[in-house]
Amino acid sequence: MSLRLIELILSPVDAPFELKNIINLEDIIEYWEEEIPGQKRKLSFLVSTEKSSVILDQLEKTFSGTTEFRILLYPIEATLPRLKDNSANQDSRASQAKPKRTISSLLPVSREELYNDIEKTITQRWIFHLLIIISAIVASIGILKNNEVIIIGAMVIAPLLGPNVALSFATTLGDLNLGKKAIKLLLISIFLVLGVTIIIGFFFPVHPEFQTLVNRTKVDVSDVILALAAGSAATLSVTSELYSALIGVMVAVALLPPLVSLGLLLGAGFFPMARSAFLLFLTNLIGINLSGVVTFLAQGVRPLTWWEEAKAKKSTNLALIIWILLLIMLLGIICFG
């Protein structure tokens, strides 16, 4: 069982309260309270990961107006003695009580934990930009050598998936600041890849008949389906904490190879083929973000308060309309262009 430890720290002036009136005690595996320096109270809750999102929402709603309020969330690697499996009893009690849930049970981790994990992926550090440059160079070598294995290695290195997942998440929550960070990092990554590969394409011989290039200049409806499926898989792997699955997703997403092909072809002067490579890149970009937003929505990712949810609903609807219209335009170009 995946566990989380929630710590609630309150000031001594906060009025006494009945914990059972705030959260469902049956959602808590173990609970204890202690006094800490500064005359503060600390309440600790050992809970399953699935229940943590509900408890966090209820605690935040109840105590966010207090003078000194802080919630800390810790992942638990192990606990002794081992917990007994009471899932059958919990399911039975849950079916009787049916407490109101503020987030879908399809989301295994809390919204705050997910936000923190996703925000880390778009922190602009020199290592991120260096990985982008290295992956662009490796992919270029793979294409110039007509070697798919090298290209797959570059796809694993490239951290292009992070900004796209962050953009989908920000759109779902209506978080303008997170969305700006994701877009900024995505644009920087695109220009870095294009800058490196255009230079390589200008100085090194590019063979347009190589299969590694031909594969990145052909777009059909199956590529759209692949992009939609890969975007959904990327979102699910992040929300379910199955990070090992991200390697396979990064290979399936295929954002880097068409972008590298675009730069090489532009540098070598093969502009008609470059147009097709750009079309494939756009197809993947749109499909990933569209399915990412839909998957987050299906998993019940919502802001905490109703006014934030109203704002998020507007931004989500607008983004969905834009992504769908762009996808329809692309399908028209692919089928009839």
Image (cartoon, helix red, strand yellow):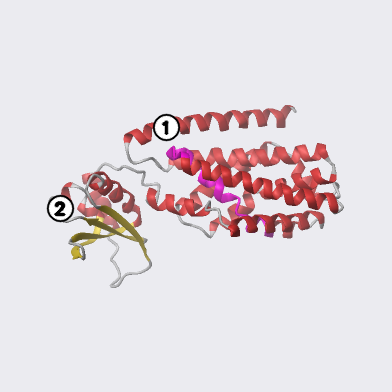
Q: Earlier in the sequence, mark 2 or mark 1?
A: 2
Q: Is residue 153 left or right of residue 212?
A: left
Q: What is the distance, in whole Å, between disc 2 and disc 1 at their CAs?
A: 37 Å
Residue positioned most to the front: 38
- Res 164 visible: yes
Q: Amino acid at mark 1?
A: Lys
Q: Amino acid at mark 2?
A: Val
Q: Which residue is mark 2?
A: 13
- Examine the image and state in which quarter residue 276 appears: top right
Q: Quadrant of the C terminus?
A: top right
Q: Quadrant of the N terminus?
A: bottom left
42 in magenta:
no
Q: Position of residue 76 (x, y in %)?
A: 35, 65
Q: Nearer the viewer, mark 2 or mark 1?
A: 2
Q: Is residue 301 left or right of residue 246?
A: left
Crowd tier of the residue under label 2, counting other residues whose Cα lies within 10 Å: few below 14, some 14–19, many 20 or above = few
Find numbered disc 1 in the image and state the secondary structure of the residue it sits on.
Answer: helix
Residue positioned most to the bottom: 81
Q: Position of residue 260 (x, y in %)?
A: 73, 49
Q: Which residue is mark 1?
A: 313
Q: Is residue 184 above or below residue 309?
A: below
Task: Name which residue lies at 16% across and 56% down.
Answer: 12
Find numbered disc 2 in the image and state the secondary structure of the residue it sits on.
Answer: loop
Magenta-drawn segment: 153-176
Q: Is residue 151 left or right of residue 324?
A: right
Q: Position of residue 3 (x, y in %)?
A: 34, 61
157 in magenta:
yes
Q: Is residue 309 above or below residue 262?
A: above
Task: Name which residue lies at 60% across and 38% down.
Answer: 286
